[in-house]
Image (cartoon, rainbow, N blue to C red):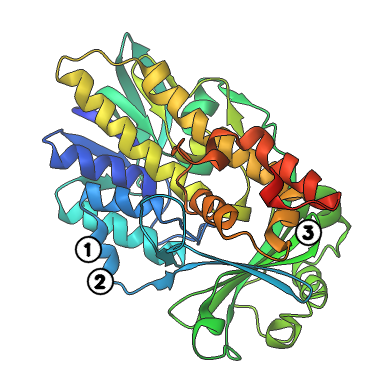
Amino acid sequence: MKKEAVDVLVIGAGPSGCVASAYLNKNGVKVKVVEKARFPRFVIGESFLPRSMEHYEEAGLLEALKAKKFEIKPGARFIRGEDICFFDFSVKFGDGWDWTWQAPRADFDMTLAEEVQRQGVEVCFETEVTNVEFKGTDSLTTVKNKEGEAYQIEAKFIIDSSGYGRVLPRLLNLDKPSDVTENSAIFTHVKDERRVSGGEGTLISFDILETQVWLWVIPFSNGNTSIGVVGPTKYINSLPEDTEVALREVINRSDYYRERYLHTEFLFKPHKIQDYSCAVKQNYGPGFVLTGNSAEFLDPVFSSGVCFATESGLLSAKLFLKEQGGQAVDWEKEYSDYMKRGVRVFSTYVKEWYTGNLQTLFFHRPENPDVKKKICSVLAGYVWNEDNPFVMKHDRVIKSMAYLIQNGGSPEEY
């Protein structure tokens, strides 16, 4: 069987894999990317966080993305009946980017992959990993290309950025249940023919239909909009079996978006995904690391997926370079513990969203500007900034403040 050798094999050409491979290539590492799908390909996760902008910039991918003129995302709006709460990323605690994008992932990921190739990284599409063998930290990966031909890739290190494909978790039996509530979603794209002009027409919005059920609306710069419903799996499965009928039934519940979207033509039959949250027993091992959704996925409510993907992709590349440079790397402390700190913060926000406690803080009036800035920083992806008490004390601050408000107090008393 034909063999080839590289320094690093990256599995997956999504945002995590592209950030990792671009950064490694920029630093003189021989890297190869294998991707099972044919690009462009549809994938969910169309809303990003400002934190990721730093990753694209550091990997040398930012200018290529800017040239595509994707829809600017200056913040996020939450709607509950007649109440509206808007978080402006330019009004947050601490430093960091004030904006990001919302974009069809088919176009966004294709832009990244093309730029990585332009920079000199070999990306093999329609190439599936069928087996991986480790000998110490060295690996021998068997892949099959679109012609059905098998060959092997020797690598000093593997970065698994395979996302929902979860290549190494599957091959190495690393999966474990997530401790995030099991939710499901139904979603599609529409031609947004009734989009109003200005910010109102382009704001990403989360319309809360009941505490645990919400509708997402993500307008794109191409005139289309992503629309979907998220809720407990039991609720989603109680809807009509026909996903188009089911999604229209949910849209009809939205006072805010009923007129705009109820009779709009769907560009494809709505997809349904169930129990999407996932986790792993370990996110690194001798000769490999797991990044992005191949390690952990929480929930789409705060758009954290791509942020964790690019954060972990860039960090894994930096730690490989550090190790190859002769410095000791404590993968448990410098990678696993670090990533888990951020995941724990976002996990708390996801859980407290579905308990209703976070919604209590969002819609409490009058607003507390200081509290709002600190929450906004978390929603922008700055979940490692422990100067922010809403990061440092995430496990108790939301619950405690919600309790105060629900019992007639105010955030200032906390």
Q: Is residue 180 left or right of residue 310?
A: right
Q: Are marks 1 and 2 in contact (CB under 8 Å)?
A: yes
Q: Quadrant of residue 348?
A: top right
Q: Secondary structure at mark 2?
A: loop
Cα gap from disc 1 to disc 3, whole angstroms = 37 Å
Amino acid type, label 1: Glu
Q: Residues within 10 Å of mark 2 (few under 14, many from 20)?
A: few
- Against 63, residue 84 (above or below) is below
Residue on which the image places disc 1: 63
**Point 36% across, 51% down: residue:** 95
Q: Quadrant of the N terminus?
A: top left
Residue on which the image places disc 2: 67
Cα gap from disc 3 to disc 2, whole angstroms = 36 Å
Amino acid type, label 3: Val
**Point 44% across, 39% down: residue:** 385
Q: How many marks?
A: 3
The residue closer to the viewer here, 76 or 31, is 76
Q: Quadrant of residue 205?
A: bottom right
